[in-house]
Image: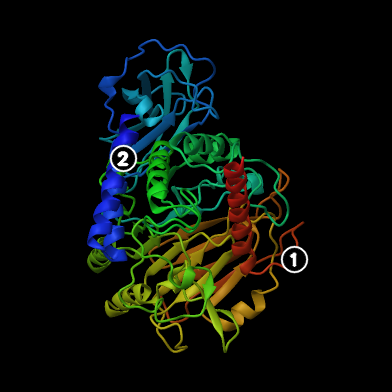
């Protein structure tokens, strides 16, 4: 209660000062960002020393219901994660005590050769989650890990370190995924992903969705239900993350490989921008909500302590080197962006959206990206991020529309990136993208309106795990969209993930899809495979197939996804009106 009153007092003073100064909108957002940082700090300010330590815990039920995970691997280190939650949908069901959690790391899955062990304190402050940063490991090596608390033993997880920085590496294989709306389908794709032979998994956002039960409806029908109404508070977000983490196939995929994660919007709220909510709530209320969401995200992801919420947000943009083969620059396109132009949605470009001062990454992150790209000596420079990077026209050729939430809504920011890459004569940049619930593949160029522009790289957009329901091969607007965007070479609307296999000379992307998600048990197939070999030919399709049992065509169009979000928001507002009325 003290923290809540202190935060309310800070916001009240902040508003009074703004009224006196009559500051502009940019100044307001800067101040709001400081308040957000203070609220995050208050949310985790309690020290472990303030709690009693329960050295011999006796759990009400099995505590490792959310499984285990590893992440943020380096050549000599990796993060091991779990959370104690015997009553996972009711705040975790843990007493307000610190609980010791023992961990072991071995070179074999039977733990005959344990090489590291230790104890972490699981505190109520972080929902009894633990983030173990194990150091002193061998490069490019597989390890197995497990946890024990009281008399309970966790499942076994498998992880792998990265090759030494700069070391010669002949190949690597990884997958990336995104957008897993729990209600829209079963996580069958993760069942198959867990069986792949991979070095690493990237998750590009929308790990959870914030909507209440059956507010956001899939075109093919919701088949599971969220555990509550729209999530707002820290406990709300904790319970929603727990519900998603409890899925057996998601747990299997986490346990099979190390993950590198970043968020998009639904980890907080649809299409939020920095400290600006979607609509229907005050900035002050949203600041508190974002603080709760950020903390819950950290609590449930295998992140390093350097990503713990502090001083204005969370440090999620970071770099990973896979020997001399690839440098990965993980971006955060939500936390630092300017508000969407033109009221969001799909709109024509205007002076507002074309403003050269607009930023998507924020000045610091943009400089960080350019510094790393400029100094890279790697065969590949890879940018795992959230939103569609290449230009993507909708509407008609004479009246095109663009997504104001994607890089198309921040064209000057994108131009700074492509100009930098072209200025360095680079042709080895790969962008990995989620968000749009469909598969795409595109050549990247510094000028998307010039058919003779040099190819500087490629973008691979991965479909959703479940979001949007069953999907189809093509949609009603596919042919028109591809005709208006000649740099885009592929589209598909089934669900799944993308598997990438890379060597110094070639990047191969396999679009792995399932024909349906509204029932469990779907088989996986590779709908198409593309290669990019850093030459003027750009993307080349090397394999294609039909998807057994999958719909060939649907009457959906891109705008339907936005309309579904709008309908969900209308349901939320109606619930709030009824609450006020009663």
Q: Is residue 125 above or below residue 564?
A: above
In the rendered structure, the answer to whether residue 473 lies left or right of residue 248 reads: right
| Image point (58%, 72%), residue name | 490
Does residue 103 appear in the picture of this structure?
Answer: yes
State which quarter of the image contains the N terminus. Answer: top left
| Image point (56%, 86%), residue name | 399
In x, y percent, where is residue 373?
28, 66
What colour scheme has been applied to the protein in the rendered image?
rainbow
Q: Quadrant of residue 274?
A: bottom left
Q: Is residue 409 above or below residue 136?
A: below
In the rendered structure, the answer to whether residue 380 lies left or right of residue 158 reads: left
In x, y percent, where is residue 244?
55, 39
Q: Quadrant of residue 129?
A: top left
In the rendered structure, the answer to whether residue 284 lies left or right of residue 525 reads: left
On residue 7, the disc is 2
Dot 2: within a 10 Å radius of its alpha carbon, few (fewer than 14), some, or many (20 or more) residues?
many
In the rendered structure, the answer to whether residue 256 lies left or right of residue 35 reads: right
State which quarter of the image contains the C terminus. Answer: top right
Dot 1: within a 10 Å radius of its alpha carbon, few (fewer than 14), some, or many (20 or more) residues?
some
- Badge 2 marks a residue whose secondary structure is helix
Q: Is residue 451 above or below residue 237?
A: below
Residues under labels 2 and 1: Cα distance?
A: 53 Å
| Image point (64%, 80%), residue name | 480
On residue 552, the disc is 1
Q: Quadrant of residue 27?
A: bottom left
Q: Is residue 202 above or below residue 471?
A: above
């Amino acid at each position: 209660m003290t923290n809540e009153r202190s935060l309310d007092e800070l916001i009240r003073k902040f508003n009074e000062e703004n009224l006196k100064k009559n500051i502009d909108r940019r100044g307001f957002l800067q101040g709001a960002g400081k308040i957000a940082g203070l609220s995050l700090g208050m949310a985790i300010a309690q020290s472990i020393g303030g709690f009693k330590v329960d050295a011999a815990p006796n759990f009400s039920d099995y505590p490792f219901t959310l499984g285990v995970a590893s992440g943020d691997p380096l050549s000599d280190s990796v993060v091991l994660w779990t959370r104690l939650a015997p009553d996972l949908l009711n705040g975790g069901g843990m007493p307000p005590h610190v609980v010791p959690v023992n961990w072991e790391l071995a070179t074999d899955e039977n733990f005959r050769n344990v090489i590291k062990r230790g104890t972490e304190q699981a505190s109520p402050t972080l929902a009894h989650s633990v983030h173990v940063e194990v150091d002193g490991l061998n490069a490019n090596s597989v390890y197995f890990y497990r946890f024990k608390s009281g008399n309970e033993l966790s499942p076994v997880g498998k992880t792998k370190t990265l090759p030494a920085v700069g070391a010669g590496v002949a190949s690597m294989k990884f997958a990336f995924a995104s957008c897993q709306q729990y209600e829209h389908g079963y996580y069958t794709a993760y069942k198959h992903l867990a069986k792949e032979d991979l070095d690493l998994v990237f998750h590009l956002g929308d790990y959870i969705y914030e909507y209440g039960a059956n507010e956001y409806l899939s075109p093919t029908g919701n088949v599971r239900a969220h555990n509550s109404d729209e999530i707002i508070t820290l406990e709300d977000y904790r319970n929603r993350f727990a519900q998603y983490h409890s899925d057996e196939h998601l747990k299997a995929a986490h346990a099979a490989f190390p993950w590198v994660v970043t968020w998009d919007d639904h980890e907080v709220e649809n299409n939020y921008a920095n400290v600006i909510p979607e609509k229907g709530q005050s900035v002050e209320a949203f600041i508190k909500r974002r603080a709760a969401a950020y903390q819950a995200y950290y609590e449930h992801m295998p992140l390093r302590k350097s990503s713990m919420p502090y001083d204005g947000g969370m440090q999620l943009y970071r770099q990973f080197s896979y020997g001399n083969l690839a440098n990965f620059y993980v971006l955060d396109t939500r936390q630092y962006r300017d508000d969407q132009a033109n009221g969001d949605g799909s709109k024509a470009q205007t002076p507002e959206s074309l403003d050269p001062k607009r930023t998507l990454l924020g000045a610091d992150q943009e400089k960080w990206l350019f510094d790393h790209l400029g100094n890279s000596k790697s065969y590949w420079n890879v940018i795992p991020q959230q939103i569609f990077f290449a230009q993507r026209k909708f509407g008609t050729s004479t009246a095109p529309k663009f997504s104001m939430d994607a890089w198309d809504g921040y064209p000057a920011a994108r131009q700074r990136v492509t100009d930098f890459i072209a200025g360095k004569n680079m042709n080895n940049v790969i962008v990995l993208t989620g968000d749009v619930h469909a598969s795409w593949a595109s050549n990247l160029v510094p000028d998307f309106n010039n058919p003779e522009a040099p190819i500087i790289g490629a973008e691979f957009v991965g479909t959703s795990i479940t979001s949007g329901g069953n999907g189809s091969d093509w949609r009603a607007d596919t042919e028109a969209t591809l005709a208006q965007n000649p740099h885009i070479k592929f589209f598909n609307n089934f669900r799944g993930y993308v598997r990438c296999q890379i060597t110094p000379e070639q990047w191969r992307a396999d679009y792995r899809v399932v024909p349906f998600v509204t029932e469990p048990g779907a088989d996986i197939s590779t709908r198409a495979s593309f290669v990019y070999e850093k030459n003027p030919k750009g993307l080349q399709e090397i394999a294609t197939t039909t998807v057994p049992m999958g719909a060939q065509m649907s009457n959906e169009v891109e705008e339907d996804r936005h309309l579904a979000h709008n309908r969900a928001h209308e349901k939320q507002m109606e619930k709030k009106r009824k609450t006020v009325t009663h």
